[in-house]
Every structure is written in structure tokens, then in C-alpha cells.
Image (spheres, grey):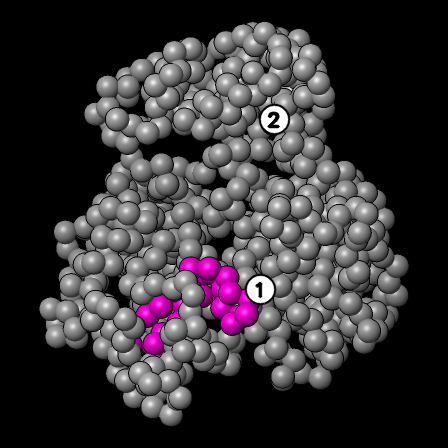
């Protein structure tokens, strides 16, 4: 029996539950909210609550009511008898009229409960769980207020600081946009610094902080944070590397998770908020694409009005698993009607170097770095075509005539039953890893570790991490490089599964076990992790939650890069198969990508986008 089907549900939700559109949790929450309201709740209202709960579960903050008819059965297999079901969605106009008069929206007889919010927007009526509407409203209101004024900056001092840190302006050079980003951050209370992988976002952040220090003094208070501990550790390492080679940044900013910065408590509450604001002059958030609406609203509420906020990230990557794709929404907002700050114009001289649309976004505090410093050629063109959703171009660039135009082939497509090239790569990778590890060469072992990685969409199943890990272990064993089944061995790749502040390792960190003959432990093993240019060494027994890693999910690979990447596409009809997933996977590679899957699956991925509804992109009014 399917655990997601609620046997007791005999009402209007049953057919949607059978069709996989509402999960058991959606049904239970809808029933519970209806009961708590103390009112007589009709079938359409019940469906509305379940829709709003489902929206949050699938990463949206709201439901665009005009398009609910487009929601079709979500089933494991196309052979499921429910696949042909035409779902009996209520007519949107009727639903809106019902909700306008519903106690769920206007106020329940049982008390202050008003669980749903009904709004109107450029995209038609939007239905929210009220909690998420409030968070979105808070984000909108605070950003508007912060955008209404600008820090006072002496243009001459700004130009001098930027020249000192970046060198003088050479229009059209590698770093003119990076200079412009620093100038925008100095002249705005809120700046969004967007860009694909390797466009120099972290490089720019380190220098931008040096500019702030020159402008605000050596006692400037800087808060650095990221949604995950690992991303925070990576930002810390990059800034440490910059400090080690430059005289311009004397402050030692410490990076932490957004949760920690905001004083998260185990009961889910936060120490920081409107009544207890953060003490910083500048706050930088890295990997903002992973930040959900709840954390963004809390962060904004915790900022002083005179704190500069810099949100850094790649809006095209997979968004947070929680509701909201805030970075993508903010990048899309344009600043029509807002003047570019004159100090910015004087220093960055943007004329002719930005398109009109870019200039409008600049006025709204958004700047995008476009020049890749890590790779060019086929990978970046394929990534660009994926981002544009152009499946024909993607296929042409990988297998068609366009592929022949590249000096070196970086991207290939392998049929699922023809993976011999992957086997060869995996064996070469394992041999390098084991040789370096057994020789106790930590640096070489870490280099080998990130020279190749297999990435899958799913955790389970034949095309998932579990199936591919088994396959890879079998290949290594067959080739004579036996993989012991119990305990760690020298040369074993490790993935950390939980944050451990005491040992400074974080969920998603990958390291490698090496031979450590000089160590004090009896087994002669150590486990090493890269931290910028430095190496962190622990004993494997100090890892409280870690597992061997022969393959990992694309979600967990976010923020990491590998020399070569093998991307395993899921089954054709898998809901996960989207262009954001494929873009994230392909851009993890520095020089080679092998995609395992059919052309059909590749096209399906490029053609499907993660649907994340939110009201942040347009103005929203009460209906
Ligand atoms: N203006 C520049 N001149 C020289 N090298 C640069 C410049 N900008 C960036 N780089 C180099 O390019 C590489 C990528 O930069 P960086 O890591 O900052 O990119 P990123 O956008 O943060 O990438 P990711 O999001 O993948 O972490 C780094 O090695 C960096 O030192």
C-alpha cells in the first residue's frame, strides 16, 4: 500500500491524493487547519488549504490560482491507472470568490486564526499560507526602505580606495565589472552580486571588503555568512588567502552560517531580530541562492538601517529546498525610476559597458559578473544554452556539428549502457587517490580527490548515488584495488554528513583518508580536508557523521568544483530532471563533463524548469 495515500480521506482531497498531487501530509494539515478554524469549511476551501501547503512543500511561497488547472497527476510511473485522471480542480474565479468570503482568509470564529492570505498581483490572484505572505511582505518592505536612501560617499575617496585595491580602471578589462561591483556595494545599502561559477564573486568580495575598510576605517565591523557551514568555511578560506597576500585588509572577518549569525536556538527561535539587531557595518551572504524566504526575512529584520548588505550567488543554480528562490527573484527586480548613484557613475564609468536592462538592474543594486575565469569553451557554452532552455543548441553543442568547432572536446553524452569511459576515469581517479594517500601525501591526495566526481540526481535506485557507488566499488575491486568493507582505509574518499563546529568540519565537506605514520594513533591513518591553501587534518575517529563517497547527489555538490564530472541523468519522467539541476551539475566541472543518459532525457531536462511561485517579482495587493 502507498504510504502517501490517506485511507481515511473520503472527501474531496482523495482524488488529488490518489493522483500524487497532495501527499498524506498535505491532506492531514488541510484537515487539521479546517478543524481548528471552528468554521464550516467547504470542499473548495479544503482544496485551497492543501494547495497552499503543497506550494510550500514544493519550494513556492504561494499558489497562482489562475493556473491550478495545469497541475497534473504526479506519479511514480506512467503506467499508474491514475495517470489518465483529469483532476476536478475548482474553477479559479469561483475559488477566488469563495476564498474572499472565507473565514480562512477573513478570520475564523475559533479565535485569531487567519491561515490563508489572498492577494492579487501582475500574475493574477495568489494564495498564500499567511506566514509566508508575512515573510515575503517583510522582505519587500525592508528592501524598499533600504533602497529609498544611499550611503553618503565621497567619490574621490571611493575612487582612491578602489584604485588602491583593484588597480586603475581599464574599461573592458577582466576586472572592470568587479570594480563596478565594489563601487555599487559602497554606494548602496543593499547589493546583489550575481554571477556563474568562476566569474570571480569570491575574489571580488575579498577586495570589496578591503575597499570598505579603506572607506570606513580599520575598525569596520564585518559579518560574513552563508546558508551552509561548508560554504562559510570556503568563503573564510578565500578571504584568508587574500589577507595573506595583500596589505589592504587588516580586519579579520569570521564567516559563519546564517543560522548562527542570527542566533538560532534549538526551539526554532532566533536571538536576533528587529528588537536585537546585528552590530555590523557590512554583512556579506555567500551562496544566497540556497537561502529560503524564512531566513532572508529574518536576516533583513535583524539588520540596522545603516548596515550595508551584500548578497552573493548564482541565481541559476538549484534553489533552497525550503520555500522561496529569493536570490532569483531579487535579480529579476529592476530599478526603473531609481537614479544610479553619482559616485558610482563617476568611479565605475558604466556607460557603454552595460546593456540598458543591466543599467536598470544596477540602479536597483544588482550587478552580474559575466566573465568566467575558470573555464571557457564548450562547458560555458553548454551551460549558457542550458540556462537559456535551448535544448536544440545543447544537443548541437554536445553531439552535433557545433561540437566539432571546439578546439578540445569538454562535454560528451554517453548512452547508459556504454559507460566504459566512465569506468576508465574512475579507475584512474581511484589509483591516483590511493597512491598519494598511501604515500602520506595529503596535498596530492586532495588534488586527486577533486579530479573526478560522479553526480546523480537521486540518492536511491539504479541511476542514483546508491546504485552508482556500488558500481564504482565493484569496478575498483575487479581491477585489483580492493575496497575493504569495514572501517576506513588509506585512499578512501569521505563525505561529512553533519556540521561539527568543534572540529570545524561541515555537512558536505569532502576529504580523504591518508596514511599517517608520524601520527599518534595506532592505526596510522589521518583524514585531510582542503581549506583554501591550507590543509585540515583529523583522525577518522573524530568524524562523528561521515560516509565513503564514490558518488554524490547534485544537490550536495552545490558550491564544489571538480576537474572532471560525470553527470548521471535520472529516468525521463523523474520530476527532478530540470534545467537548474543540469546547469548546477555541468558547472561543477573545471575541464570535462560526461553526461550519462539518452538525448531524450537531456532534452527533457533542458526543457523543464523548476516552478517556484512567489510574489516577490511583482507588486502584490490584498484582494
Ligand atoms: N580579475 C581577476 N583577475 C585574475 N584572476 C581572477 C579575477 N577574478 C577572478 N579570478 C580568479 O578566478 C577564479 C574564480 O574566482 P572565484 O572563486 O572568485 O569565482 P566565484 O564566482 O566565486 O566562483 P564559485 O561561485 O564557483 O565559487 C579564482 O581562481 C580567482 O582567483
Q: Is residue 121 left or right of residue 196?
A: right
Q: Quadrant of residue 148?
A: top right
Give percent across and percent down for residue 69.
45, 17
Q: Main secondary structure of the magenta part?
A: loop
Q: Is residue 231 magenta?
A: no
Q: Measured along the vertical axis of the image, is residue 530 above or below residue 319? A: below
> Element type at marker 1?
helix
The quarter of the picture where the C terminus appears is top right
Q: Is residue 508 magenta?
A: yes
* Residue at figure coordinates x 69%, y 27% from the top left: 620
Give percent across and percent down for residue 327.
60, 47
> Element type at marker 2?
strand
Q: Measured along the vertical axis of the image, is residue 595 above or below residue 218? A: above
> Is label 1 within 8 A of ligand 1 (CB to nearest ligand atom)?
no
Q: Is residue 576 left or right of residue 482?
A: right
Q: Work out whether mark 2 precedes mark 1 in sequence or the reverse, and give the earlier one.
A: 2
- The reply to whether dot 2 and dot 1 touch (C-beta < 8 Å) is no
Number of numbered markers: 2
Residue holding disc 2: 128
Closer to the camera in the image, 241 or 329: 241
Give percent across and percent down for residue 319.
51, 46
- Looking at the rendering, the stretch of residues picked out in magenta corresponds to 491-513
The quarter of the picture where the N terminus appears is top left
* Residue at figure coordinates x 26%, y 53% from the top left: 466
Q: Is residue 343 in sight in this rendering?
A: yes
Q: Is residue 335 left or right of residue 427?
A: right
Between the residue at mark 2 and the residue at mark 1, the CA separation in whole angstroms equals 32 Å
Residue holding disc 1: 232
* Residue at figure coordinates x 45%, y 80% from the top left: 537
* Residue at figure coordinates x 56%, y 10% from the top left: 41
Amino acid at each position: 500500500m502507498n504510504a502517501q495515500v490517506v485511507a481515511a480521506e473520503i472527501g474531496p482531497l482523495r482524488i488529488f491524493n490518489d493522483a500524487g498531487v497532495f501527499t498524506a501530509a498535505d491532506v492531514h494539515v488541510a484537515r487539521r487547519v479546517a478543524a481548528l478554524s471552528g468554521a464550516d469549511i467547504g470542499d473548495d476551501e479544503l482544496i485551497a488549504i492543501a494547495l497552499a501547503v503543497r506550494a510550500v512543500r514544493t519550494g513556492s511561497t504561494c499558489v497562482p490560482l489562475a493556473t491550478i488547472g495545469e497541475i497534473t497527476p504526479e506519479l511514480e510511473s506512467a503506467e499508474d491507472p491514475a495517470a489518465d485522471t483529469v483532476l476536478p480542480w475548482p474553477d479559479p474565479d469561483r475559488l477566488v470568490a469563495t476564498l474572499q468570503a472565507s473565514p480562512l482568509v477573513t478570520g475564523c470564529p475559533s479565535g485569531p486564526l487567519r491561515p490563508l492570505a489572498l492577494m492579487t498581483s501582475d500574475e493574477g490572484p495568489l494564495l498564500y499560507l499567511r506566514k509566508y505572505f508575512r515573510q515575503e511582505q517583510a522582505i519587500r518592505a525592508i528592501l524598499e526602505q533600504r533602497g529609498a536612501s544611499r550611503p553618503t560617499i565621497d567619490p574621490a575617496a571611493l575612487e582612491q580606495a578602489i584604485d588602491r585595491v583593484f588597480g586603475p580602471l581599464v574599461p573592458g578589462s577582466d576586472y572592470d565589472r568587479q570594480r563596478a561591483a565594489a563601487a555599487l556595494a559602497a554606494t548602496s545599502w543593499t547589493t546583489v552580486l550575481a554571477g556563474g561559477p568562476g566569474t570571480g564573486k569570491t575574489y571580488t568580495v575579498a577586495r570589496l571588503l578591503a575597499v570598505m575598510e579603506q572607506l570606513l576605517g580599520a575598525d569596520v565591523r564585518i559579518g560574513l555568512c552563508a546558508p551552509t557551514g561548508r560554504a562559510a568555511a570556503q568563503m573564510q578560506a578565500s578571504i584568508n588567502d587574500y589577507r595573506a597576500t595583500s596589505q589592504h585588509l587588516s580586519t579579520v572577518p569570521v564567516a559563519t552560517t546564517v543560522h548562527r549569525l542570527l542566533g538560532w536556538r534549538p526551539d526554532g527561535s532566533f536571538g536576533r531580530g528587529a528588537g536585537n539587531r546585528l552590530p555590523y557595518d557590512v554583512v556579506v551572504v555567500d551562496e544566497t541562492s540556497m537561502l529560503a524566504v524564512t531566513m532572508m526575512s529574518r536576516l533583513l529584520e535583524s539588520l540596522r538601517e545603516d548596515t550595508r548588505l551584500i548578497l552573493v550567488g548564482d541565481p541559476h543554480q538549484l534553489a533552497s529546498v525550503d520555500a522561496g528562490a529569493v536570490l532569483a527573484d531579487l535579480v529579476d527586480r529592476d530599478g526603473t525610476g531609481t537614479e544610479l548613484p553619482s559616485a558610482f557613475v563617476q568611479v565605475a564609468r558604466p556607460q557603454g559597458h552595460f546593456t540598458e536592462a543591466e543599467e536598470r538592474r544596477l540602479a536597483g543594486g544588482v550587478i552580474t559578473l559575466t566573465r568566467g575565469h575558470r573555464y571557457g569553451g564548450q562547458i560555458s557554452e553548454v551551460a549558457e544554452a542550458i540556462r537559456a532552455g535551448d535544448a536544440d543548441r545543447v544537443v548541437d553543442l554536445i553531439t552535433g556539428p557545433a561540437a566539432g568547432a571546439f578546439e578540445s572536446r569538454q562535454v560528451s553524452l554517453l548512452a547508459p549502457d556504454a559507460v566504459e569511459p566512465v569506468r576508465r576515469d574512475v579507475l584512474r581517479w581511484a589509483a591516483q587517490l590511493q597512491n598519494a594517500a598511501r604515500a602520506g601525501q595529503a596535498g596530492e591526495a586532495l588534488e586527486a580527490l577533486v579530479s573526478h566526481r560522479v553526480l546523480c540526481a537521486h540518492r536511491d535506485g539504479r541511476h542514483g548515488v546508491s546504485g552508482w557507488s556500488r558500481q564504482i566499488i565493484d569496478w575498483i575491486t575487479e581491477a585489483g584495488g580492493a575496497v575493504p568493507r569495514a572501517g576506513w582505509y588509506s585512499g578512501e574518499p569521505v563525505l561529512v554528513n553533519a556540521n561539527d563546529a568543534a572540529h570545524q568540519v561541515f555537512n558536505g565537506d569532502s576529504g580523504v583518508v591518508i596514511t599517517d605514520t608520524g601520527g599518534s594513533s595506532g592505526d596510522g591513518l589521518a583524514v585531510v580536508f582542503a581549506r583554501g591553501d591550507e590543509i585540515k587534518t583529523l583522525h577518522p575517529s573524530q568524524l562523528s557523521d561521515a560516509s565513503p563517497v564514490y558518488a554524490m547527489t547534485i544537490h550536495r555538490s552545490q558550491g564544489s568544483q571538480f576537474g572532471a564530472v560525470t553527470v548521471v541523468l535520472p529516468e525521463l519522467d523523474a520530476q527532478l530532471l530540470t534545467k537548474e539541476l543540469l546547469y548546477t551539475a555541468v558547472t561543477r566541472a573545471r575541464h570535462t563533463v560526461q553526461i550519462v543518459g539518452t538525448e531524450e532525457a537531456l532534452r527533457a531536462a533542458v526543457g523543464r524548469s523548476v516552478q517556484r511561485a512567489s510574489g516577490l517579482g511583482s507588486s502584490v495587493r490584498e484582494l
